[in-house]
Every structure is written in structure tokens, then in C-alpha cells.
Amino acid sequence: MGDVYTSLREFLDKTPVGFPETPDGVEIKILKKLYTPEEAELTMKLALEPEEVPVIAKRIGADEAELAAKLEDMAQKGLIYRVRDGDKKLYQAFQFIVGVYEFQLNRLDKEFCELFEQYLPYIGMNMASVQTNQLRVVPVESAVGKGGTVEPYNQIRDLVKEQTTICVQNCICRLEQDLLGHPCEKPKEICIGFGDMAQFTIDNKAGRQISVDECLKVLEKAEEAGLVLQPSNSEKLEWICCCCSCCCPGLKIAKSTPRPQDLVRTYYEAKIDADECTGCGDCIERCPMDAIADGDNVSEMVDGRCIGCGLCVDVCPVEAITLEPKPDMDAPPKDFSDMLNRIATERGVA
């Protein structure tokens, strides 16, 4: 019984971000909680690219109707990923983060959250070992255009207006912290999906479909709440996480280091005009990374801490803060698949 979970761990470790082994075996406890032995076996028979049920059934020698029912049940549980092609449903095995963990929105309980928190440092080391991030930071709307040029892939509202399928769902990080006894007052129904990711979430009843206008209002709500916008690290918009530094694991870890900028993919950093600044301190309270400090009658940027979210720009009453592009920044990967392929290559599992 234990062998199938060890095999599943090894299988998942070959996905782009991986699923590393730990000294205390917490990763096996997570797998046993999420998957039955039969579900574990079937997952390992799937490809890492979407396939139609007849193709999978022929390859593994399964009855097509029975297999379709099993795969759909597993997709509903968030154990595998489902993609639509018209009326057809395609299924694939998927990585743990960003992936199976986020797909557990409807199945969260305290035990799973505790196991995940124990495992987070190990999978975090995997993610930190590669150059390509899965998330990046883009400026909030009020900061766009105040300073340097904003590239098209960072004009988040323009990208949203191009979308046809959009959903909004609860932030799994905030729900997890609630279950662990650390409630957050920031909005919960605030994270956004697009395209295939949105359709998967809608089909699983883990979020609700919204229009472009509703999506723009969600972004306004996120900015008002002082949340950092972290879309997929790709030119094609796949999702936008609206994050706080008290719940988001990535921001929380970054904030705890001397130079958050080195751990977060960001294209901008804030600059304060000392001649204009009055030292009111509004930006200091607003900054999620403690990137601004009191100086000699003015506020000053702390080297290496700014992640370019732009939340400080709009609260400055004298417009002393602007966002400036970081030099020599390459465009993000084209889409989610390109991003995962880069990560897999960097980990040596491509």
C-alpha cells in the first residue's frame, strides 16, 4: 500500500516544479490524504499533456466509459487537470504547485493545511533552485504610466479586456490561514483565472464565472485592499493572484529576507523624489515588503526590498513616488506551457 504512494511521489517529482522527498515523510501523508491507491495508480498512467479519453483508454487497456467516469471524478477532486476542446474533455497528470494544491479549494481542512505548512519549506527549496518563477509582480492600475514605460505584458487591465472566459475564486492561502487560526481581514474572493484555468475552476464549482467588467472591479477591490498583483509569469494571462504578505507563502518568505527583490520576479522598482517628499509616512504603512523607511524628514527606499507592486504610488499625496523599469529585463515566457517547459529544463526533468 505504501509502495504506490512512494511511486506517485517519484512520478510527481518528475513534473516541472517537482515533489521532493522529506526526512519525516510528510509528502507521503499528503498523498495518502488526497489519493486512494487506485487514484494514485491511474494518475501515474497519465501523460503530462492533455489527452482524450479514447487515447488514454487504448494505451492503458481500460474500458472507455469506466475510465471517463474515473478521470472526471479525479478532476473534480483536483487530483488531475482537465482541458476542454469544444465538447471533448482531455485529461492529464499535473504538478503539485501551481496545480494540485490550488485545486483543493473545495477539500481544504485543518489537517491538510497543517501537512502543507510542514511540506512548504521543502517544495519551496525546489522552486528557489530554478531561474524561472511561476509568478511575477505587475503594478496596480494607479501606478501604471507614472514613471517609465509599462510593457504590454504588464498592462494587466488591457490583458484582462482580451479575455473571454474569466472566473473569480477564494484565495486558498487566506482560507488555509483561517483554518490554521490566523484569520486575515483582506478580501477572500479575489483570485482570478482565465481561459483553461478558469474553465477548470468553473466546472469544478470552485469559483464563479465573471465578465470583463466584473474582473476589473475585482482588481479595483484588490488595489483598495493593498494586495500585490501576481499573475502567471507568462505573456499570455493564465491567472492573477491578489496577494498579501501575511498569507502568500512566496511573499511571506520574500519579506523575511534582506532582499525580497531577489526572490520575486518584478519589472519595476519605486523611486522617491526627495525634493517632493514631505515625509508623511503614508507609503511606509502601505508597503507590503517594508521597502520604505523614515529618513531625514523624507521617506527613503530600502535597497533590495521593493518588488515593484506600485501600491505606494497612489497613496503619496504629493506624487513624489514613481515606478521605474528595471534595466535589462527579458520578457516572460509566452504561455503557461512555455513557462513549465523552462522550469522542467532548469530542473533537468524535461
Image (tube, rainbow, N blue to C red):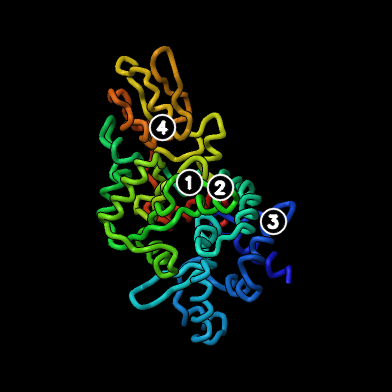
Tag of residue 127: 2
In the picture as drawn, the residue positioned furthest to the top comes out as 296
Tag of residue 286: 4
Q: Is residue 300 left or right of residue 95?
A: left
| CB under 8 Å between discs 3 and 4 | no
Q: Closer to the observer: label 2 or label 3?
A: 3
The amino acid sitting under disc 1 is Asn
Q: Position of residue 98 (x, y in %)?
A: 50, 55
Vertical placement of 325 versus 88: above or below? above
Between residues 171 and 267, which one lies in front from this camera angle?
A: 171
Q: Closer to the observer: label 3 or label 4?
A: 4
Q: Residues within 10 Å of mark 1 (few under 14, many from 20)?
A: many
| CB under 8 Å between discs 1 and 2 | yes
- What element does badge 2 sit on? helix
Q: Residue at x 43, y 68 (%)?
A: 205
The amino acid sitting under disc 3 is Val
Residue topped by disc 1? 133
| CB under 8 Å between discs 2 and 3 | no
Give how far apart the Cα atoms at labels 1 and 3 are: 25 Å
Give how far apart the Cα atoms at labels 3 and 4 are: 37 Å
Q: Position of residue 215 (x, y in %)?
A: 31, 54
Q: Earlier in the sequence, mark 2 or mark 4?
A: 2
